[in-house]
Image: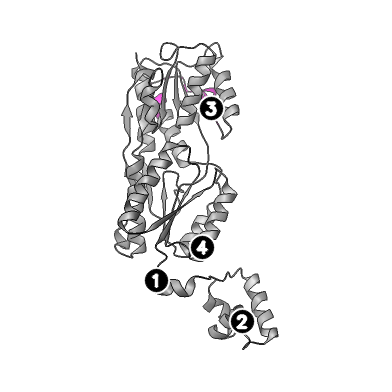
Amino acid sequence: MNLKQLAKELNLSISAVSKALRDSHEISASTKLAVLAKAKELNYQVNPFASSLRKQKSKTIAVVVPEIDNIFFALAINGIESVAQEKEYHVLIYLTHEDAQKEVSVTQLLQNGRVDGIMMSLSSQTTDFSHIQQLKEKELPIVLFDRVAEHINVPKVTTDDYDSGESATEHLIEAGCKKIAFLSISNNLSISNKRKSGYIDSIKKNNLPNSKNLIIECSQDDEKNKLLIKNLLKKKNRPDGIFASVEKLALLCYEVCDELNLNIPADIKIIGFSNLHTAALLKPSLTTITQPAYEIGRESALLIFKLIEKRGNSIIPEKTVVASSLIKRGSTKK
């Protein structure tokens, strides 16, 4: 709902509606009340920056991420800022703390014209993507990265999650694992589901046990996740390999193995998606699927500026995939 549409609904001129919303003395009290009532009914929101933004841009972009303790997002933000600095833009960073409602609130806040574009990675709790669709309909430039909504037609930058999931599982099989568990972070996230699909297909291809008990659906609660992993590894027929879909689950596996006196990699082998600089320093060092986080951030920023500058819109790809790499270390050693 914009000012022109609101004026049409009221059968008034755009100028009269604008003055009524500004509480101008030129407009009668009854007309002001009618305008405000209709604006509320149609969810019209006054944009305090609109007039200035018609003349110039805010020179600011927003980055919305679910967490900052994950080194992936810190590196991605570095990549985004490297491009923003080249363009002489400011970067506003918003944390949703894996809260879907906070994510919605942030997107509503950003619709008022304070930023020229938004780069977003979705929370693990997000199941309704209407707020993303709303941003698109308002023609606010938006790029999704890493955690994306597959069916929303906006540019996306991801890594090769399915292929990487398959490669991680194949590596564990080559290392001698016969019973491999998968630790999933959320059924709502495309990254987790694609990594799981790669894992499942690799298990099937190699005729290994394909038990639902080997797929552990974790959450954002570290203590609960730790208990799930501990229960898994205390079983008599425990797995001999674990594929952790995110780095914090791999680290929890190390904690549990230490508590249960299980030797990595002799008793159990572990691989995980991670950008941790300390992965090589763990005892034993952690085998990882390492995402090019900085490059993903930089590519996302290049796309957002193409949208902002309205250049090459017709050739902007719907999805850009940046390949990850498998780094073999001590946790999967034969």
Q: Label 1 is placed on what type of residue?
A: Gln
Q: Nearer the viewer, residue 231 or 119?
A: 119
| Residue at mark 2 to residue at mark 1: CA–CA distance | 25 Å
Q: Which residue is tagged 2?
A: 20
Which of disc 4 and disc 3 is earlier in sequence?
4
- Does residue 151 lie above or below 314 as drawn? above
Q: From where the camera sits, is residue 304 visible? A: yes
Which residue in the protein does label 4 denote? 111
**Contact between labelled residues 2 and 4, with CB atoms less than 8 Å apart:** no
Q: Nearer the viewer, mark 3 or mark 4?
A: 4
Crowding at label 2, few (<14), some or many (≥20) Cα neighbours within 10 Å? many
Q: Mark 2 or mark 3, which has the lower sequence index?
A: 2
**Residue segment shown in magenta:** 201-218
* 220 lies above or below 142: above
* Mark positioned earlier in the residue sequence (2 or 1): 2
Disc 3 residue type (three-letter): Ile
